[in-house]
Image (spheres, grey):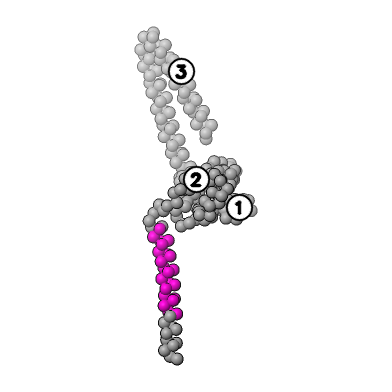
Amino acid sequence: MKMRRIFVNISLLIGLGFSIYILVVTFTKFEWNTVAATLAVITAILSTWMTQRIIWKQEDDLEPSLNTYLDLKSRHGLIQFVIENNGGSTAYDLKIVWEKPLLDLYKNEVHFNQDKNKIDIPIINKGQRLSVIVKGSLDAFKEARQTNEEMDYFGKILFKKSKKSKKILSLDFYVSLEPYKRSLTFDSEEVNFYYEGAKIHKDLVDINASLKELNDNLNNKASS
């Protein structure tokens, strides 16, 4: 598809250049009929180019568009590696090939549930978001400070546009934890509310258990 677009652009550019040359020559010779015809040709070439641009944009919108990023906000204290399909169609047989790998808690490369063919994700539909937990964020940043590591990671995603297709496409990706080193804050108060609420709930459960134990002891003393 890319080569076809290059060929069309080159052809239109050659046609436009040749038409402009004829326009200049005929204009200097005052051949107005030819000038008018040449202007019409130039207009047609420009119109064709604009139409092709619109068609190519529509074609691109129908392609799968994979986006990768690190999510530190959705789950408190955890880093998630996310792949999201923002395109207009489904992608198949996704494989993650790390060049500078992001490692999990056990020092293994981060992957989804790979099958025997090393496929991380068999299918990701348009608008779908899939994630895998990497490790705890505090541990990750503490380790990075100790080793003075730059927290940038990159690689490729290999995928197909059709399950039966033999053509494998490659997408370079880059993710980084560097911006979060000094900005570990909640994007949403809702996340903080749920996290703090969970701690409060646990405290209330503990208090209730203590009160029940105290009440049982008092009842036992009173009965004795």
User: Can residue 182 be found in the magenta stretch?
Assistant: no
Above or below: residue 16 compared with residue 152: above
Disc 3 element: helix
Closer to the N terminus: mark 2 or mark 1? 1
Q: Which mark is residue 29?
A: none
Q: Which residues are magenta?
A: 192-213
Above or below: residue 210 compared with residue 151: below
Front of the two marks 3 and 2: 2
Amino acid type, mark 3: Phe
Which residue lies under the disc numbered 2?
A: 178
Number of other residues with Cα within 10 Å of mark 1, as a class: few under 14, some 14 to 19, many 20 or more: few
Q: Which mark is residue 18?
A: 3
Residue 116 lies, in percent from the top left, at: 64, 53
Mark yes or no: residue 129 visible.
Answer: no
Front of the two marks 2 and 1: 2
Q: CA distance from mark 3 to mark 1?
A: 59 Å
Task: Decide whether the magenta segment is chiefly helix, strand or loop.
Answer: helix
Residue drawn at 40 percent across, 21 percent down: 42
Amino acid type, mark 2: Glu
Disc 2 element: helix
